[in-house]
Image (cartoon, helix red, strand yellow):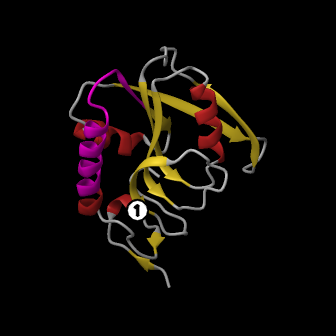
């Protein structure tokens, strides 16, 4: 049964339940910021947000990382003429900064199939970064096509359709 949740941001949409409330998300984002700060004690850190879904998570996350960093974005497309993935990932927007020798943290809202992330990891890896890691707010653990571990995970996500927090 779907129960309407009294939140004006939902604009009349009904949701089954709240998987992670605002306070829980804020607390975990703060913890992730501390983990990331500790993981990168030196060197240039470039945080790349995968748009559009990661935008809100990314903006909260970078405020919790207590070290110098740069932020940029990637826009990837893997859809053909319909809503079915073509399997071909192309970068619609690609930062024109050099990745060579930098720590790269790729920030994603949710790891689902892993297809797009796997192809992005391969593309970015060709640019010789010092390190290349993934940070995701949510991970469904069904990413059979992602062979690169997601180093920083906010929450293990239920296997259902999720909305909110920019998703």
In the displayed structure, would residue 55 be above or below residue 100?
below
Q: Which residue is mark 1?
A: 10
Instruction: In this rendered view, identify the residue nearer to me: 66 or 59.
Output: 66
Task: Give the mark count.
Answer: 1
Q: Quadrant of residue 148?
A: top right
At a point 58% along the width and 55% down the height, the residue shown is: 112
Q: Quadrant of residue 47?
A: top left
At a point 45% along the width and 29% down the height, the residue shown is: 131
At a point 49% along the width and 23% down the height, the residue shown is: 129
Q: Bounds of the magenta span?
A: 26-47
Q: Position of residue 99 (x, y in %)?
A: 49, 19
Question: In the drawing, does residue 111 fall left or right of residue 135?
Answer: right
In the displayed structure, would residue 98 be above or below residue 74?
above
Instruction: In this rendered view, identify the residue nearer to me: 107 or 56.
Output: 107
Q: Position of residue 67 (x, y in %)?
A: 23, 29
Check residue 33 for magenta coloring.
yes
In the displayed structure, would residue 17 be above or below residue 113?
below
């Amino acid at each position: 049964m779907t129960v309407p949740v009294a939140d004006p941001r939902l604009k009349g949409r009904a949701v089954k339940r709240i998987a992670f409330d605002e306070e829980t998300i804020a607390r975990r984002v703060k913890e992730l910021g501390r983990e990331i700060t500790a993981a990168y004690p030196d060197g240039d850190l470039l945080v790349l947000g995968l748009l559009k879904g990661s935008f809100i998570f990314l903006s909260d996350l970078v405020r919790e990382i207590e070290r110098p960093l740069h932020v940029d974005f990637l826009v990837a497309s893997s859809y053909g003429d319909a809503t079915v993935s073509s399997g071909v990932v192309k970068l619609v927007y690609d930062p024109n900064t050099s990745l060579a020798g930098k720590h790269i943290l790729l920030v994603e809202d949710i790891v689902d199939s892993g297809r797009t992330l796997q192809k992005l990891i391969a593309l970015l890896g060709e640019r010789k970064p010092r390190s290349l890691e993934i940070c995701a707010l949510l991970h469904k653990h069904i990413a059979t096509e992602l062979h690169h571990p997601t180093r920083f995970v906010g929450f293990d996500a239920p296997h259902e359709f999720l909305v909110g927090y920019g998703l």
